[in-house]
Amino acid sequence: MENFERRLRVERLGRYDSHAILCFSRRPYPSLVYLRGRLSVLRAVNLREVGPRQPSDSSWQVNRKPLPRNAHRRESMTDGPLAAPPEACVPGLPLPSTVTERFLEAGGVKFRYLQGGTTSGLPVVLLHGWPTWAEVWLPVAWVLGARHPWIAPDLPCQGRSSPLPGKVRTLTAYRNAIAAFVDALDLPRFAVVGNSMGGTLAVMIALDRPARVAKVVVLDAAGLTPKLPGKTARMYLPFLLPCFVRAPGPKSVRKLLTKAVFHDPRFADGAWVDAIVAAWGPRDRRRAFMATGFALRRRDASVSANLGNILAPTLILSGRHDVQFPWESAEEAARRIPGSRFAAIEDAGHFPMVEKPRETAQLISEFLHTSG
């Protein structure tokens, strides 16, 4: 019974030292984890022909909407109860009760950010990629929050954060704005985790604030090569060029998500498509997105020449099936960072924290808890 319970804690909850809701009891009385695990096994056997059931993870039941018609498809492509429902990764839905939304002005930008986790421990700053939002981190943040306070901002010009001041949308402008944001947070020491363009910014923060950045994790980061791969640019051009005259529709968004972002095309569902269509609708936001996308081809968007100057312990992660930035280039970048580590996440594309939140969270958590 004890071994079964330990496995449940790790496999179904992502960690062994879980929150008080697990109500651990010593033998001979089985704990709630044990009972819930056995019950889920019985339900899986008895209801296999009936259809899916709603995940039993109580922390994500607050303000949940009824399961959509394609819930059986979504359940099959998540990592189990540890993962938030896929729609929880998009904006506009009620946040879990343990997550707080805040606003902070810094560097001429009014940042909107999400905050959660413990009140002690090494803070973790989570930076999303272009052009998404802070909510993409929620499934991973739920696990990291067991031991760490975490903060996930919407990057400038994205989500509900205001645009960068002026008309410049270069990575240098984003770099300065994010540096101002972390300075305003007044964190003496913190870890920084970033995906895609957020990975580039994570490396930039480590270079700009070496005394305060304790650890760095980047996932499928842009900027690890001297210039943006031509294949990546060609993937986005058919989507970006029509945006000069009109907002993208659901068809073009879904095509981009399935071609360039997700390894499993089922993740390009209605929630993701609708969220991106809505984000790209306003003309001023669309122009900012396009300017940022094209800025990724500029010289200042690369941190390749400075990888050897990173002082903080670094973990580089890559979805094994990322077609934008192949895992081989990420592994090569890891070799150029003193003492860094590399890991590829199987069955994941450009957003492993969405497609494989369990594996992503475990790799990040283990790295944060190691010394050095």
Image: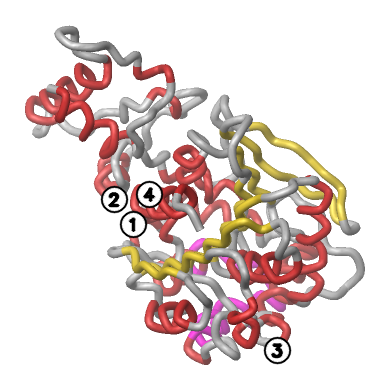
Q: Earlier in the sequence, mark 3 or mark 1?
A: 1
For the residues labelled 2 and 1, the Cα–Cα distance comes to 8 Å
For the residues labelled 3 and 2, the Cα–Cα distance comes to 38 Å
Residue 264 vertical position relative to residue 204 in the rendered view, above or below: above
Residue 95 vertical position relative to residue 263 in the rendered view, above or below: above
Magenta residues (range): 232-252
Instruction: List x then y, in percent, for residue 108.
Output: 90, 57
Tags 4 and 2 touching, CB below 8 Å = no
Q: Secondary structure at mark 3?
A: helix
Q: Residue at x 62, y 78 (%)?
A: 240
Q: Earlier in the sequence, mark 4 or mark 2?
A: 2
Amino acid type, label 2: Met
Amino acid type, label 4: Gln
Tags 3 and 2 touching, CB below 8 Å = no
Q: Circle 1 sits on which residue?
A: 266
Q: Circle 2 sits on which residue?
A: 77
Amino acid type, label 1: Arg
Nearer to me, 80 or 332 = 332
For the residues labelled 3 and 1, the Cα–Cα distance comes to 35 Å
Q: Circle 3 sits on which residue?
A: 299
Tags 2 and 1 touching, CB below 8 Å = yes
For the residues labelled 3 and 4, the Cα–Cα distance comes to 34 Å
Q: Secondary structure at mark 2?
A: loop
* Mark 2, other Cα within 10 Å: few <14 / some 14–19 / many ≥20: some
Q: Circle 4 sits on which residue?
A: 362
